[in-house]
Image (cartoon, grey):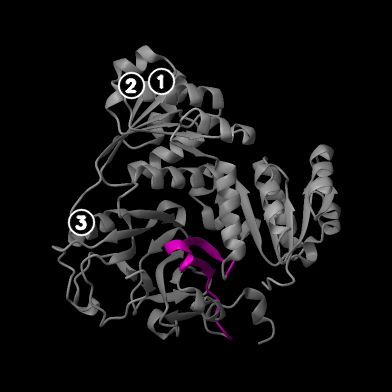
Amino acid sequence: MDRETSHIVIIGSGEVGHHLAEVLSKGEHRVSVVDKDPVRIRELQESLDVQAIQGDATYAEVLTLAGVPKADLVVVATDNDQVNMLACVLSRKLKAKRIILRIKDTKRVDAYRFFYKGCLGYDVLLSTEELAAEMVLRTVATNHALEVESFAGGQVQLRRLRLGTDSELLGTPLMKLRLPTGVMLVAVIRNHEVSVPGGQFSLEADDHVYVVGKRDSLDEFEALAGEPVKLRRKVVIMGGGSAGVAIAQRLDATPGISVRLFERDPKRARRVAEQLSSRVLVLEGDATDLDFLMEEQVGEVDVFIASTRDDEDNMIACQLAKSQGVERTVALVNKRAYSSVYNLMNIDVAVSPRLQCAQRILRFVRSESVSSIAVIADGRAEVLELEAHFRGSKKECKVKNLGLPDGAKIGAVVRSEDVFIPNGESTVEDGDQVIIFALPDNIREVESIFLEPDSHVAE
């Protein structure tokens, strides 16, 4: 996507869309915004240098008027998941080059993520709840070397670990290391420089390593890493809605964190208990009730997270938790105007799921490729998701014969609903989804290896 002349269409001018329009309109982009609310459209016209179009994004005529057929990027970000999915399909049919689809709740797509990707036609899928959970995870894990990203519907993780001085991995070339089955070391940070190591590379103490694999295999790898200090934290989550569940799942997947979740509604508490693993203790109770907090000894936990859709309840619960001696409070912000109020209330961290989503989209716009599904290492590396297509009649190719540059590695392959971690002898088939770790300078070369389906027509 040519950043000098790119045309970006934003569908929806809520908190996500408005923030994107405000930032992108100040850069080298032509920005069009579609929203059915005349008040929002008027605000855009009066405050930003964008083309603001009032209309229903589920009408092809409206999308055409906004320039979707010639758009370099379409960001579908209304507050209605169903509208977003239909607008995504229409935008793809209208030949938009790239599409980022934002939805609030990923439950419907989790088990069939690649099926939905094929049907809806998006390039990148973002969930406000998942991004908020990611932000909370980073907050809870402050001063800990572990960073976690999940891919392929949660079946594959990318973790960053710091190697301790007693690690069994030190001083031996990677090609001779006996790593757990199903684990691949894809990158190393040493002296603030990111590299994709080859077989002769040897690890050193204090290296930060990125490893890809399935959870159980990665747990084995952590033991080899010799991490001297394991994070041990007790966390309480208030609220069993979709955001609270997403946060609980991410924290539960992080070694050393014990999680309790409080939900005041008995029926929802039972449903949530069935959704989460047995390691998460779900209790029926109101976290704005001081007696309940005292009974559950909340003052002994390290982090209290208020994740309901009610900002007032979140603020009250965090204040009560602080009064009981909780070290750190985290609250989700649902109303844009309340962000400053949270700071005044002395809440340690206020997380806006919609603002997090907007910031992630901006990272994709500014990154080397919109096929990115994660921008990591402070923007010095990206994780790409590409569909494999080969030149001519070729239908498959071994990983070692793909011609990947030194700054890129395939971390996982998704075939139908199966996921595997490949080695050099593994075969990538036409139509596979490949998850690739790449340095920015190598992204264009990687994308050229896996051709888009349309590029076969000329051959």
Q: Which of marks 3 and 2 precedes in the sequence?
A: 3
Alpha-carbon distance for marks 1 and 2? 6 Å
Q: Toward which corner of the image does residue 207 lie, by quadrant?
A: bottom left
Amino acid type, label 1: Leu
Alpha-carbon distance for marks 3 and 1? 35 Å
Report the disc number at residue 324. 2
**Considering depth in this image, is 83 or 126 the residue closer to the camera?**
126
Q: Which of marks 1 and 3 precedes in the sequence?
A: 3
Any part of residue 98 in sight: yes
Name the residue rendered at 24%, 76% in the picture. Answer: 174
Task: Give the percent coordinates (x, y) of residue 66.
Answer: 82, 57
Q: Which residues are magenta?
A: 369-392
Q: Assign a secondary structure to mark 2.
A: loop
Using residue 317 as the reference point, say whether residue 71 is left or right of it: right
Alpha-carbon distance for marks 2 and 3? 32 Å
Task: Give the percent coordinates (x, y) of residue 364.
Answer: 58, 62
Label 3 belongs to which residue?
227
Amino acid type, label 3: Glu
Label 1 belongs to which residue?
320
